[in-house]
Amino acid sequence: MGMILLAFGLVLIVEGLAYALAPSLVERMLEALRRVPEPARRLVGLLCVVSGFVLLWTANRLGF
């Protein structure tokens, strides 16, 4: 459970920094994402989820 809270906290920090430091960049990125087909966005999301699980699993196996 602690690992999940740590990961969630890190995600919130990174996301919050993006919105706080470069809100106009976030707007442009969202506009660019609208032009990407939905299946491609879904695949990228799935790859991110799998990559996140692999990173968490690796960190857990290394004792972090």
Image (cartoon, rainbow, N blue to C red):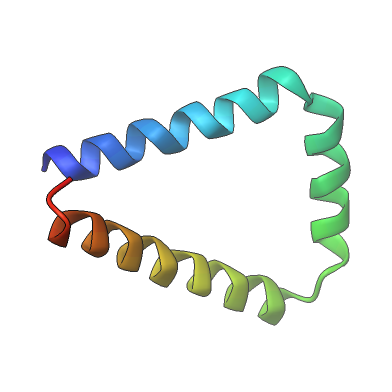
> What residue is shown at x 22% (from left), y 44% (from top)?
4
Q: Is residue 24 left or right of residue 57?
A: right
The quadrant in which the N terminus is found is top left
Q: Is residue 45 left or right of residue 39?
A: left
Residue 42 is situated, as x and y percent measured from the top left of the image, at: 60, 74
> What residue is shown at x 40% (from left), y 72% (from top)?
50
Q: Nearer the viewer, residue 56 or 47?
A: 56
> What residue is shown at x 32% (from left), y 42% (from top)?
7
Examine the image and state in which quarter residue 57 appears.
Answer: bottom left
Up-down relation of residue 46 to residue 31 (above or below): below
Examine the image and state in which quarter residue 11 appears.
Answer: top left
Q: Is residue 42 left or right of residue 3?
A: right
Q: Please identify the residue farthest to the top as the structure is shown.
A: 20
The quadrant in which the C terminus is found is top left
> What residue is shown at x 34% (from left), y 38% (from top)?
8
Up-down relation of residue 36 to residue 2 (above or below): below
Residue 26 is situated, as x and y percent measured from the top left of the image, at: 78, 37
Residue 60 is situated, as x and y percent measured from the top left of the image, at: 16, 55
Residue 41 is situated, as x and y percent measured from the top left of the image, at: 67, 70
Count how many numbered circles sit on residues in the image: 0
Up-down relation of residue 38 to residue 58 (above or below): below
